[in-house]
Amino acid sequence: MHNLSILIAASEVVPFAKSGGLADVAGALPKALAALGHDVRVVMPCYASIDKALYGLKPLEGALGVPMGVMGEAWAGVYESVLPQSTVKIYFIEHQGFFGRKGLYDEEGQGYADNDNRFIFFSRAVMQLAKKLRFRPDVIHVNDWHTALIPVLLNTVYANDADFKGTGTLLSLHNLQHQGKFYKGAMDVLGVGWEHFNASELEEYDGVNFLKGGIVHADAFNAVSQKYAQEICTPEFGWGLDGLIRDKSYKLYGIVNGVDYEEWSPAVDTFIPARFDSDDLSGKAVCKEALQHRFGLAVKSDVPLIGFVGRLAEQKGIALIATIIEKLLQLELQIVLLGAGEKWAEHFFSQLASRYPSKFACYIGYDNELAHTIEAGSDLFLMPSLFEPCGLNQIYSLRYGTVPIVRATGGLDDTIENYNSANRSGTGFKFYDATPEALQATVEWAVDTWYHDKEGFKKLRDNGMLQRFSWHEAAIAYENLYRHIVAGRHGSKEQESR
């Protein structure tokens, strides 16, 4: 089979810029696809926060003209580099007016008022860059609302462009909650014609919905786990688009994200106090003690330590945790929390730490080294998300012998098998209802297992450490989907020519 030319467009890519899981995928998947022999290029915005010297960004000759409808033609600079530890080329679209700011999408929690124009510009620039490079992609893989207009542009403005003859599109949904909803005047900048402003394409409640347009126009779209692909067809998880998604479900797929085990593995992790693996867990005990020291907790090896790393946002189930945490702290256990987000939560957990200094500690903010140490030093890991498209921390936890406690939703349900004490199978503890009572009962079950079923807990830990969710597997699944899209595109072109 011939190798594919793949163009991946994303608003954030590790290590250059990150706000969530999208960046991890956009940084890892291209390398795994290139390892399969494909010609992969990545494009992202050149944010002010990116250190050009550190990452070896080199300017491409000549400016890039970007049509912006009623705003006229805008001009972009283009920089080039490679993804770390690879030969995969990544291009950065520079525009001081749009991207020369502190944040990626917002500042102080306030989204930029011109996010519509910023990402119309970026989407248009991706198409223009492909032409400039004379790169003819078999597939353009776009991600979330920021680049969801590319399939719309391909089917309209670029429909008869020879450079994109036969090019297909895949739209990946990393979080359906954010859809890119804007004032309808964005249509005049997008420049695809007002005939596409209708309820079947871009229009929603007299505004424009970028993600809706992408779902309608993409050749296929996927969620980042099988379970999330099912969930987004329902009102509870569909964020108002469930009807459309059910209607388009014939082109919906689910592919679980992989994990970069070169970074997230206790056998090679450079951030943790001692390395370890499934055949020798002595290093894990060292990490636990270091974590207790780091947070000023009582240094005890015989008490279960529960970790939480994540955004302090409603989606992550922090209200559930806040409701029951004082009851949990009556048990013989310790809890550490790392994260930032909603102000009430930052305040609440900080106050709590001062009241239970030997049992609860928190770090408000993000610290990558500390995140690794929490994964390595904890006995249990808490992820009670209300929804979770894929989730990565529960997969990291498995590898570090840190048994996950999760709500059975999205990727958490796909990647964690519930503990069965009868035959000691499973990799974690799951609960189903998003209620404080269900979470409390499950944490108590996990703690009870730690104290009274030591063999069972050891088996859970061993089972988890053997699990692998590799990018190689995920890349093969994407490769198959790309080939399906390309075959479909060529099939429809043949029918048109008959």
Image (tube, rainbow, N blue to C red):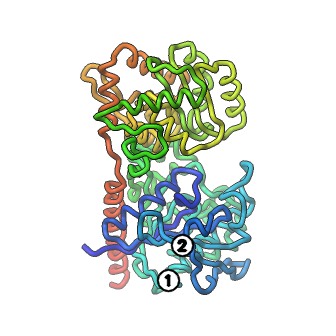
- Indicate the position of residue 124 as horizontal and vertical percent values: 59, 75
Name the residue: 33% across, 18% down: 454
- Indicate the position of residue 230 as horizontal and vertical percent values: 42, 45
The secondary structure type at the circle numbered 2 is strand
The quadrant the N terminus occupies is bottom left
Q: Name the residue under label 2.
A: 91
Q: Which residue occupies the foreground of this view, 122 or 173?
A: 122
- Label 2 and label 1: CA atoms lie apart by 11 Å
Q: What residue type is labelled 1?
A: Leu
Name the residue: 42% across, 21% down: 446
Q: Are the residues tagged 2 and 1 within 8 Å (C-beta)? A: yes
Q: Which label's residue is closer to the chain start, 2 or 1?
A: 2
Q: Mark 1 points at which residue?
A: 133
Residue 244: tell me if it is visible.
no
Q: Number of callouts in the render? A: 2
Q: Which amino acid does label 2 sit on?
A: Tyr
Q: Which residue occupies the foreground of this view, 162 or 62?
A: 62
